[in-house]
């Protein structure tokens, strides 16, 4: 089959895991493959995805082949596919805007962003690169809090006629005004804020759904997360966290039998621990009452490699987005957004969202 041509904004840990995965699964077969929710989506397997354009602002990545850039500092995720072949795609200088938080300059270069001296590409140049590369889908992996930069690149995608997958918590895909723009042009979108395959949010949602289904009243809960990658370092600036906290909190609130008051639910990044690198620790507590109003609680500790965990969802979002392009569907893709994103246009329980995705893959129209 023809390749699914993608462009990527931000060649960090998540992009590294995705690109490694594309090549890791190339010589696997569907009988013994591990780590995928779907081997085949509409005839497309992971190795049918091809990176044709990339943007970053770090001097250690700009100007280098994507195959090399994904292993440059400050990336620190697990290397599970060392032999990523040269792509022939050079990382282009992006546009910084609010993509780099000021406090990042206070940390060692190995752990933070180092902005390139190369001149930033303006919107017209980025649109030109997207068009000339033949990109069909643009993936956004900007840091949390990059509100202006995300909307800038969403506009670039719109004007270039390229589908947009928003993997971070700036609410573009779920915004009706943005949806109307993409829908008018017949361009599909997936978002906002990528889930993990088995991460803090999906685990919290599953347990919350279990409480509801088993008649247990959830009274209060928290989710505290620590990590040592640039995402957690970036989020030490609490002013950049509003949309992230809203996204993660709403993902849990949406599946509760009864919404909790704000003082009874706390979900969000908690601290940066350098030596954890891309490993994320989640500490989760849920308190409720069972039969006879008898109290109970759950304490859970989850440890995951953060970026490969998200790549397992993105690789499905890309292929579903390709199917939408082939079918001439524009605007929000409800099913795959609900299944793979924390803040989709419409929330569904994960079992319902999964069924919706299976129906979409089989050819059923989006709601």
Image (cartoon, rainbow, N blue to C red):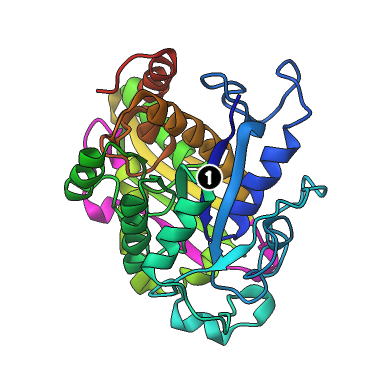
Q: Is residue 264 left or right of residue 98?
A: left
From which residue to which does the magenta span run? 253-278
Q: Is residue 147 magenta?
A: no
Residue in the picture at 52% in, 37% down = 313
Which residue is at the front of the view, 64 or 273? 64
Residue 229 seen in the current view? no
| Image quadrant in which the C terminus is located | top left
Residue in the picture at 46% in, 75% down = 100
Residue 274 occupies quadrant: bottom right
Q: Is residue 258 magenta?
A: yes
Question: Where does residue 21 sit, x and y in percent of width and height?
Answer: 68, 40
Q: Is residue 209 above or below residue 107?
A: above
Residue in the picture at 31% in, 63% down = 242
The residue beneath circle 1 is 6
Question: Where does residue 305 sit, x and y in percent of width and height?
Answer: 65, 49
Q: Is residue 164 left or right of residue 319?
A: left
Residue 229 occupies quadrant: bottom right
Residue in the picture at 64% in, 61% down = 90
Question: Where does residue 201 sit, x and y in percent of width and height?
Answer: 45, 43
Residue 279 seen in the current view? yes
Q: Residue furthest front?
A: 132
Residue 352 occupies quadrant: top left
Which residue is at the front of the view, 110 or 233? 110
């Amino acid at each position: 089959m023809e390749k699914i041509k993608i462009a990527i904004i931000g060649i960090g840990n998540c992009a590294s895991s995705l690109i490694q995965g594309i090549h890791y699964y190339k010589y696997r077969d569907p009988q013994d493959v591990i780590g995928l929710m779907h081997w085949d989506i509409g005839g497309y397997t992971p190795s049918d995805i091809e990176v044709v354009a990339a943007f970053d602002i770090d001097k250690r990545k700009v100007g280098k082949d994507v195959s090399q850039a994904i292993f440059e500092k400050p990336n620190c995720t697990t290397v599970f596919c060392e032999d990523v072949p040269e792509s022939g795609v050079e990382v282009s200088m992006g546009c910084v805007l609010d993509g780099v938080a000021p406090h990042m300059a206070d940390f060692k270069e190995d752990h933070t962003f180092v902005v390139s001296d190369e001149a930033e590409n303006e919107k017209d140049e980025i649109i030109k690169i997207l068009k000339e590369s033949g990109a069909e889908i643009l993936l956004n992996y900007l840091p949390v809090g990059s509100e202006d930069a995300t909307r800038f690149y969403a506009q670039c995608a719109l004007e270039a006629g390229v589908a947009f997958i928003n993997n971070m918590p700036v609410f573009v895909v779920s915004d009706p005004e943005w949806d109307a723009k993409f829908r008018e042009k017949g361009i599909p979108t997936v978002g906002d804020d990528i889930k993990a395959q088995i991460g803090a949010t999906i685990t919290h949602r599953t347990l919350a759904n279990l409480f509801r289904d088993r008649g247990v009243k959830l009274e209060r809960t928290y989710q505290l997360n620590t990590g040592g990658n640039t995402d957690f370092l970036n989020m030490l600036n609490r002013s950049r966290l509003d949309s992230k906290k809203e996204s993660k909190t709403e993902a849990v609130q949406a599946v509760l039998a009864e919404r909790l008051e704000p003082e009874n639910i706390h979900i969000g990044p908690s601290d940066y621990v350098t030596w954890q690198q891309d490993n994320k620790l989640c500490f989760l507590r849920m308190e409720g009452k069972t039969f006879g109003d008898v109290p109970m609680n759950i304490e859970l500790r989850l440890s995951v490699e953060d970026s490969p965990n998200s790549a397992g969802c993105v690789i499905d979002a890309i292929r579903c987005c390709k199917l939408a392009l082939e079918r001439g569907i524009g605007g929000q893709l409800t099913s795959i957004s609900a299944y793979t994103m924390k803040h989709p246009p419409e929330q569904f329980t994960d079992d319902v969202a999964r069924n919706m995705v299976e129906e979409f893959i089989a050819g059923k129209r989006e709601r």
